[in-house]
Image: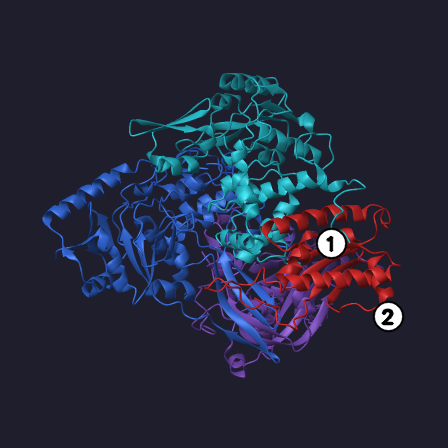
Chain colours: A purple, B blue, C cyan, D red
Amino acid sequence: MTTTNISPSKFLAQDNVYLPHIVVIEKIIEETPNIRTLHFNFKDKKLQKEFSFESGQFGEYSVFGIGEAPFCISSSPTRRDHLEFAVQRVGRVTNALHRLGVGAEIGFRGPYGNSFPLDYLGGKNLVFVGGGIGLAPLRSLIWNVIDNKDKYKNIDIIYGARTPADLCFKYDLDSWSKNKTVNMVTTVDRGDESWTGKTGVVPKILEEVAPSAKNAAAIVCGPPIMIRFTFPVLTKLGFTPEQMLTTLEKRMKCGIGKCGRCNIGNIFVCRDGPVFSYAQIKSFVSSEY
Amino acid sequence: MANKKISKKDIAKLLNQWSREFAVFVPSKESGIATMARWDGKDVTLDWYRNTVIPKANFLPAMEEMFRFQKDKESYNIELPPDGGKQLIFGIRPCDARALAIIDANFKNLYQDPYYLSRRDSAVLIGVGCINPSESCFCTSLGISPTESKDVDLMLTDIGDQFLIEEVTDKGKKLIAKASGLGEATKEDETRAKEMKETSYNKVTRKINTEGIVERLIACFDDQDFWEKIAAKCISCGICTLLCPTCYCFDINDELTKQQGTRFRSLDSCAFPVYTKMPMENPRAEKWKRVRQKVCHKYGFFPMSFNAIACTGCGRCIRLCPVNWDITQVLNNLPVKTEVGK
Amino acid sequence: MEQKLRNEARALLEQGKIDWIIGFEVGSLKFTTTPLITKDKSDTERLVINPFIANNLANFLTQIKGRVGIVAKGCESRSIVSLIQDNKVVRENVVILGVPCTGVIDLSKVEKLVGKDRDELDDIVRERDKVIIKVNGKKKELSTTQALFDHCLACELPTPREYDILLGEPTPPIANPAAQESIKKLKQVAPEQRWASWEKELSRCIRCYACRNVCPACFCQRCFVEETEPQWVLPAPRWQDNLIFQIIRNIHVAGRCTDCGECERACPVNIPLRSLTRGMYDIVGELFQFKAGLDKDALPLMTHYEEKEAEDFFR
Amino acid sequence: MKPSIDWEPKLVGFLCKWCSYAGADLAGTSRKKYPANVRIIKVPCSSRVDSLFILKALRLGFDGVLVSGCHPGECHYQTGNYRARRRVAITKRFLEYLGVEPQRIQASWVSASEAGKFADVITEVTKGVKEVGPNQLFSERQKNGTKTEKRG
């Protein structure tokens, strides 16, 4: 049922799984007025060396005294001098994360969940479809793929946001558009005077770009509404449900399949996900994804 | 090997022997409702019906401290709460004991939950058979007898002035070996116990049909009309979940005072809209979806994952519900033919 | 009365005057009833009126779209009027089927007086001012003042004042002073002891929010306990937070609470919540001569003011 | 618990910015003497003060709460202080009913020019709270029934 086999993360497997490790914020990048990327490292240098994760996995981040929230690790396992995650200011914990400065200490436990199936993606043309902060989990995989370019074929990236000011990871977008092995398409729902790129919602632009489904896989992440409209377009382009991957988001507390709330039918997004193929989602008994 | 027996008036003496090693909990009506309370050395009430607050609370408290953190100059020190010690639960019902065995699966799955499991491992359960099952009880439909249990360490059966004691586990055997003041059960005692068990079993009249329940639930999962209809009178309170012996969902929250803080976990309920609420959307904002989740989790999703129905037929949810929302009526009236279409 | 209700309800549904009917049907346990919320006219045959119709059905009004016929005892009619005052319910969309009420039997009181669990009782029959309990073939008589809910004994309006169809002859208020004994006693206790008793009672609270969810006056889309920015109380059952929840809940329903007693009846851990709500009910009555749900044209308590009132403690 | 002799209560005052806050300002600039026990929070109108603010202050361990606004008829927003009056009235009465000492929840009308009245109000409120001692309403009770040292 699941994309990759899940085993408890050996690393950080201490007596008490709920205890966070202390990590230090090393750099903060303000992506948009309400999204920022935080770079962090373990306070314990030994842990920093031992830590390993796969693209697509997530962690539980604590702001002590405020609470804990899950975010995917948005940096690539191939670039290990630090770790990154991106947060949109939406609630109690994310607001607190937006108040932090460089040098602040937060709690981290993880990595949790499954990851993108690299074996399955190997040797294929990859189509990344992202919207808004949904680029964060894709970004981990994109850099992973670029750093192992010989294992994969063509890369298409279609990324959109509401306005030019809402585009995240502009430095990555620049670097990918300069990369000859990548076909980078950026779009916004509404442009402004200085906007020279495409205008239109992501599913529409995807239809225009029309990447071939032959020996390809599409990896989709964005707001639920975008995901819902993207799958039909991909189907039209000839992608089978197995060829479409996405990562889901649910309210989570424990991150390890115990607290109950992130289920879709008998699937727990934190434990069995967050990466699913559209084929799997379709077979869920529940329409609650 | 012959079973032991004990006179009802000697229970306090027996508990006294055990209280040296264990924190002893017994059913009590001290606070106006029947609960499992710390034994005060007095005689034990044995005529209680069901406990409103379930023995689950001894293992998964309604609220517990996970750890404390203190800001020490620039860094945080994390400190675990002290170990609570060994518990002895006297008077647990077979349904509630089974419930613990059921939720063990969740806390053992993939990652070990240290708080719950350490309490479970060190605790001793002493079951007392239920000779007056209530009108709301339906344990027999779920393969549970009101007077027999494999999920306790010792099982007591009421045989008039005395209890017959059956040793169920090795832990139980050790307890008995150390105890004094017990008698040997005679053949007559055994016969009497058998009669009591049969009578009690037949007193459970409420039934549900669990045959093919998972498939039947999945088949009507998308029948919105059905779920809306049965959810109409539900008021979305947390009684049936928070007081369910097999409900384990929890919430985690922090609290900060000056430089010290605490992370708590507390029971949560799928009946509350905030349970699944995310900033942008809520997959179960509507009441019928939450009711559906509750029913399907207990009788569908949990069995799919752990091969056991997450219900023991204790009937608390029926009896305590302010609007008399009855799970047995729902399960016995699942629509048979449904067109599954999205 | 029951047959008249069934006929009226069926006729209303058939004539298309209402889309929904909210009433009571026999519950799944002895001596209980359960709300019946239906569009189906054949379901009206299941409608009942008996001494166990405990719920306040007005609670469901705000959840249902369309025109609704509702069975209303005095307390429900007051709650409906209060909801009309607050613009939560449009009077024209509700057909009130008024039930002159003679009080609802409190099973916990009966259990205590008879010394048996409700499962062991064979029958409970209401006869005028007596409640007759049958146990093991024997009869035991209780007076209504012993066996009815406290809030029924204190009821000022058993017959709805606001109704479209009245299903029986009006009944006089019981207004038995015995119902207020517990509150009177409470007021005589020293402040510290009073606070300590709330501490003790609320430490039992499991935060199931049944008290809030059965309450017709608690109609907020989002309750303050669910707020996270700022987080006013911890969403976990600790007595301090439980007590703050109850205090604020009572302040929020001041002037809406009709003393229907549902919160106390719904509480699974027997917290005497009516002592709180009745306390507030009396304060509101004393300070502003205001009683909730009596006049649908009156303004809600907290939205208006008199120039001279409640000034004595202002410096 | 008997307060020690040098115990000073900690109070929080919610002052309307159009009147009482200005009154406090004037009291300061005109060098009126009054106890320094009140932590002042400026609110746009006395009706901004939710009952939750009062409860939260008590929960955090403040020994008393003062809500102060414009005299009746003088509200900057016409009717705010009348609404505040109803709210404070029921909050105060209800808390008293539960067993909170009346001195802990106080209210006053102080205009921008009444520096003297402001000083008097603070003096009296502080005195009243001193009489009832430290706020231990929400502190934990020990096994022997006495309250633990107050927090915060």
Quadrant position of residue B26: bottom left
Whether B243 is drawn above or below B72: the answer is above
Q: Nearer the viewer, residue B60 or C72?
A: C72
Distance CA(mark 1)–CA(mark 2): 28 Å
Residue at 68% over, 40% down: C286
Quadrant position of residue C92: top right
Residue C252 - label: none
Residue at 74% over, 35% down: C299
**Percent of width and height locating residue A274:** 53, 60
**Percent of width and height locating residue B303:** 38, 50
Residue identifier under label 1:
D49
Cβ atoms at labels 1 and 2 below 8 Å apart? no
Q: Is residue C196 left or right of residue A177?
A: left
Residue B276 in view (yes/no): no
- Quarter containing the C terminus of chain B: top right
Q: Which chain letter goes with mark 1?
A: D
Q: Nearer the viewer, residue D82 or C35?
A: D82
Q: Is residue D147 left or right of residue C90?
A: left
- Secondary-structure class at tag 1: loop
Residue C84 in view (yes/no): yes
Instruction: Say whether disc 1 or disc 2 marks the residue closer to the N-terminus.
Output: 2
Q: How many marks?
A: 2
- Quarter containing the N terminus of chain B: bottom left
- Secondary-structure class at tag 2: loop
Residue identifier under label 2:
D31
Pointer 2 local density, CA inside 10 Å: few below 14, some 14–19, many at least 20? few
**Percent of width and height locating residue B321:** 46, 40
| Residue positioned most to the bottom | A45
Q: Is residue C153 left or right of residue A198?
A: left
Q: Which chain letter goes with mark 2?
A: D
Q: Amino acid at mark 1?
A: Val
